[in-house]
Amino acid sequence: MTARAPYFIAMVTALILGYSSRSFAETLPEFVATHFGDALWASMVYFGTRTVWPTMEIIRSARISFIFCFGIELSQLYQAEWINELRSTFLGALVLGSGFLTVDLVRYTAGIALAIAADRWFVRKRTI
């Protein structure tokens, strides 16, 4: 198995779980339905970064993930008609979001932090 494969699997898993947390929100505990989708999206971004650059230092992957996630969230402050039309599509809403929320920055931080913890744990397991 290549170095990319575990990260790709983790990325796809985070994608499926994140989408599921939105699709089945009414059946989940309120805290999970409210917060997990954004945290899992940020985890997916982190694992996507690791999929593209599997040998990159973890801290550098985290920085790239933070810049990307925070950049997307901050871009939601920009409300031009053309980008709002893009955000109104299914894919546009998934990637670009719809409205700026400060709490999303906390959720992204938690998601990336948990992804880093999982990454370090699995890296240690592979080297033992």
Image (cartoon, helix red, strand yellow):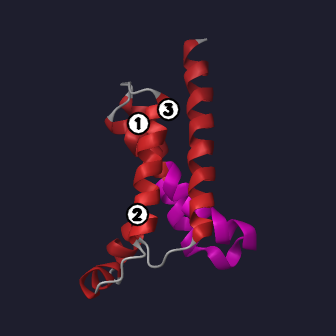
**Number of numbered markers:** 3
Residue at 63% x, 43% y is 114
Q: Alpha carbon of mark 3 to alpha carbon of mark 1: how far?
A: 11 Å
Q: Is residue 9 visible?
A: no
Q: Which residue is mark 1?
A: 50
SS for tag 1?
Answer: helix
Q: Is residue 96 visible?
A: yes
Residue at 63% x, 28% y is 121
SS for tag 2?
Answer: helix
Please name the predominant secondary structure of the magenta segment in the image. helix
Q: Nearer the viewer, mark 3 or mark 1?
A: 3
In the picture shown, does residue 62 fall above or below 15? above
Query: Position of 80 compared to 41: left or right?
Result: left
Residue 3 x, y percent position in the rendering: 39, 25
In the picture shown, does residue 100 fall above or below 120? below
Q: Is residue 20 magenta?
A: yes
Which mark is drawn over residue 59? 3
Residue 29 x, y percent position in the rendering: 75, 70
Q: Which residue is mark 2?
A: 72
Which quarter of the image is occupied by the N terminus?
Answer: top left
Q: Is residue 34 magenta?
A: yes
Q: Amino acid at mark 2?
A: Ile
Q: Which residues are magenta?
A: 15-43
Circle nearer the N terminus (3, 1): 1
Q: Alpha carbon of mark 2 to alpha carbon of mark 1: how far?
A: 19 Å
Q: Nearer the viewer, mark 2 or mark 1?
A: 2
Residue 45 x, y percent position in the rendering: 43, 50
Q: Residue reaching furthest left?
A: 82
Residue 11 x, y percent position in the rendering: 45, 47
Image quadrant in which you'd find residue 40: bottom right
Q: Alpha carbon of mark 2 to alpha carbon of mark 3: how far?
A: 20 Å
